[in-house]
Amino acid sequence: PYSHMELDNGILQLDVSLSVTLGIVVLFVGKRINDAVSFLREFSIPEPVTGGLIFALLIVLLYFHGTIFGATSKHVKAQSIC
């Protein structure tokens, strides 16, 4: 079966259509957050930066929780030592 996403040697491989779709979603999430938070507008933080940081934090939380990539915090600690 065709997969839009796969993990290959610890690198997440995304299909082009999924990458573009996620990029658009991240952009709109960043726009909504920038519209709601005056601090971000005041200091001219770009929407893609805001959305990208939120997305990156979400991926990190899911990774350490073990929800994605089949990783656990024990697995991550073992890799960081080597």
Image (cartoon, helix red, strand yellow):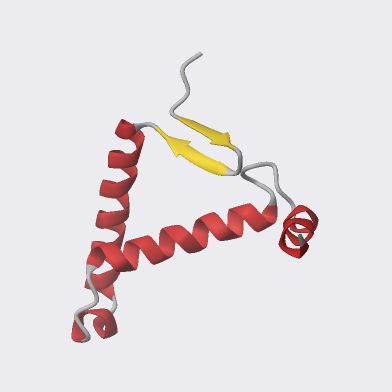
User: Is 58 situated left or right of 51 in this image?
Assistant: right
What residue do we see at 28% from left, 40% from top? 20
Looking at the picture, how far across and down is residue 44, in whole percent? 19, 80
Q: Which quadrant does the C terminus fall into? A: bottom right
Q: Which quadrant of the view contains residue 70?
A: top right
Which residue occupies the foreground of this view, 23 or 14? 14
In-front residue for pair 13/40? 13
Count the labels in the image.
Answer: 0
Identity of the residue furthest to the front in this view: 82
Image vertical order of residue 68 relative to residue 46, above or below? above
Q: Could you tell whether 23 is left or right of 4 in the image?
A: left
Q: Residue at horizontal 60%, vertical 44%?
A: 10
Q: Residue furthest top?
A: 1
Q: Position of residue 25 (x, y in %)?
A: 30, 49
| Residue at left offset 57%, top offset 36% | 7
Q: Position of residue 52 (x, y in %)?
A: 36, 61
Left or right: where does residue 71 sit relative to residue 8? right
| Direction from residue 11 to residue 65 in the image, left or right | right
Q: Quadrant of residue 61?
A: bottom right
